[in-house]
């Protein structure tokens, strides 16, 4: 297959582009260049998930690179029992947690109170023009509020509310039960409620974005490492 130009890669990485399973099969068949589609497609998710665990953008980008390299090296182990996105996210989660523990930052986790009052959904999908006038302010407030959450709540909140992953997919990525995901999300919302509930609006969708220039840097760094790594078995 001819080398894809940047526009073609970006197009194929979009929803409705080449399916993950086809990309994986073709990479395993020797078309390494197509792995860039995977990187472009999941950079935003992996960045947000890793940052949610680590609370540090530089470390999150390091985790992203390591996750992609490990995924490539073990691509033949993807058994299609789960969605590829879930398999890849789990690799990033494990890398981020390992780094978190090595840095001795792991925070204690208090069991959720099952008797606490139900918390209303805090993210409004309505585009309020008045709120949009201070969207940047609200985005900063949201990011700061999320950063203050203990890592267990923060990672679940980012996956469910910002990345809009399902409860089942989040549970599989974090290797916990769906009930644990629901409980942590409930508590995470409760912690943010007083500060954010009436003011978040539509700003959540742009929280913790990985700018395209940084996305390009991740692609370059990953491919530099892949050139000297062992190839996956076909």
Image: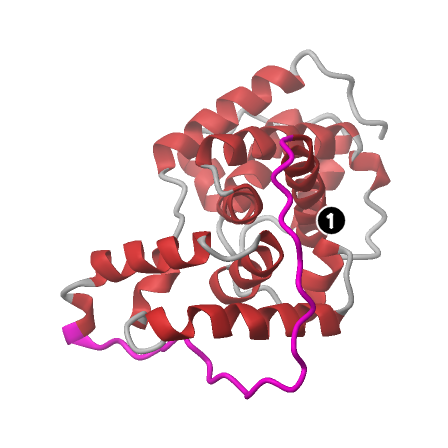
Position of 154 relative to 220 (above/below): below
Rendered residue at 30%/72% (across/down): 201
- Residue 90 seen in this snapshot: yes
Position of 180 relative to 233 (above/below): below
Q: Which residues are magenta?
A: 103-130
The picture quadrant where one finds residue 126 is: bottom left
For residue 109: magenta?
yes
Picture quarter with the N terminus: top right
Residue 75 or residue 137, whichever sits in front: 137
List x then y, in percent, for residue 14.
Answer: 48, 50
Say whether residue 8 is left or right of residue 187: left
Prevailing secondary structure of the magenta residues: loop
Position of 113 relative to 21 (above/below): below
Residue 148 or residue 170, whichever sits in front: 148
Say whether residue 234 is left or right of residue 156: right
Say whether residue 192 is left or right of residue 156: left
Picture quarter with the C terminus: top right
- Residue 83 seen in this snapshot: no
Q: Which residue is mark 1?
A: 87
């Amino acid at each position: 297959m001819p080398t894809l130009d940047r526009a073609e890669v970006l197009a194929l990485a979009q929803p409705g582009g080449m399916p993950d399973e086809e990309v994986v099969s073709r990479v395993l068949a020797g078309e390494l260049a197509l792995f860039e589609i995977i990187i472009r497609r999941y950079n935003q998710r992996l960045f947000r998930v890793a940052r949610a665990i680590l609370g540090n953008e530089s470390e999150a980008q390091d985790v992203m690179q390591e996750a992609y390299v490990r995924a490539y090296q073990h691509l033949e182990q993807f058994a299609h029992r789960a969605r590829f996105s879930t398999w890849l996210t789990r690799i990033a989660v494990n890398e981020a947690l390992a780094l978190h523990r090595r840095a001795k930052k792991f925070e204690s986790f208090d069991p959720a109170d099952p008797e606490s009052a139900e918390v209303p959904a805090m993210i409004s999908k309505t585009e309020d023009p008045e709120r949009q006038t201070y969207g940047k302010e609200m985005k900063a407030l949201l990011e700061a509020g999320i950063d203050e959450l203990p890592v267990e709540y923060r990672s679940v909140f980012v996956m469910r509310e910002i990345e809009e992953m399902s409860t089942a997919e989040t549970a599989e990525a974090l290797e916990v039960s769906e009930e644990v995901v629901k409980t942590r999300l409930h508590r995470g919302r409760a912690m943010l409620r007083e500060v954010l509930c009436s003011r978040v609006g539509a700003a959540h969708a742009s929280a913790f974005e990985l700018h395209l220039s940084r996305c390009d840097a991740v692609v370059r760094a990953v491919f530099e490492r892949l050139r000297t790594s062992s190839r996956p078995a076909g």
